Amino acid sequence: MSQYVKEENRLNDIKKYDIVVERLENRGVVLEDIAQITLDLQKKYIPNLSFEFCLEHVKKVVRKREVQNAILTGLELDILAEKGLISEPLSSMLLNDYGLYGIDEILAFAIVNVYGSIGFTNFGYVDKLKPGIIDVLDKAGKQPGVCNTFLDDIVGAIAAAAASSIAHRFAD
Ligand code: MG
């Protein structure tokens, strides 16, 4: 095993991977939804890029401990807000996806940060365009009692990070 692969593995948490994937599914997101966004982001730069390759990179992102920690934290806050277990004034900000709250994006930065500055560029692009499942989550989050405030940014960040991972791979 090369030194590079060992370093990569040290940042992974295989035990938590299944829990994180299941938590995302419970919130209506499968990794395939995220891979589709990654494919849409990167296909204009890489001809013949396959969906399976994108899915592989989405899984690679979700294996990272730092990414898992961000996902677990964000999803927990969305769920607690829905259950009415968060006090004011934070409760209303989360349930109404208050535009100037901003901490949902900050948390998502922990995910895109893993792949350097190109991650931030891709995330900004996804955040503006709201492609695929992100638009679905955004609209669902506007229903009373539903909170997807952190989830939409988490999904966008994973897609952006996977796109960045692919870009780095093709640069090699
Ligand atoms: Mg948000």
Image (cartoon, rainbow, N blue to C red):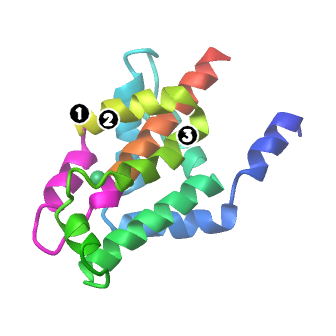
Q: Earlier in the sequence, mark 2 or mark 3?
A: 3
- The verdict on label 1 being within 8 Å of ligand 1 is no
Q: Is residue 120 above or below residue 140?
A: above
Q: Quadrant of the N terminus?
A: top right
- Residue at figure coordinates x 26%, y 47% from the top left: 134
**Distance CA(mark 3)–CA(mark 1):** 20 Å
The mark found on residue 126 in the picture is 2
Category of crowding for the residue at label 3, using alpha-carbon neighbours closer than 10 angstroms: few (below 14), some (14–19), many (at least 20): some
Which range is magenta? 131-152
Residue 170 left/right relative to 124 = right
What is the secondary structure assignment of the residue under circle 1?
helix
| Magenta stretch: includes residue 35 | no
Check if mark 1's residue and mark 2's residue have beta carbons within 8 Å. yes
Q: Residue at x 37, y 55 (%)?
A: 103
Which residue occupies 64% across, 57% down?
A: 65
| Rendering coords of residue 157 (x, y %) | 43, 44
Residue 136 shown in magenta: yes
Answer with left or right where residue 129 lies relative to residue 170.
left
- The residue identified by callout 3 is 113
Residue at which label 1 appears: 129
- Can residue 63 be seen at all in this image of the molecule? no
- Residue 60: x percent and y percent? 60, 45
Nearer the camera: disc 3 or disc 1 = 3
Q: Is residue 119 left or right of residue 142?
A: right
Say whether marks 3 and 1 touch (CB < 8 Å). no
Identify the element where label 3 is drawn: helix
Q: Nearer the viewer, mark 2 or mark 3?
A: 3
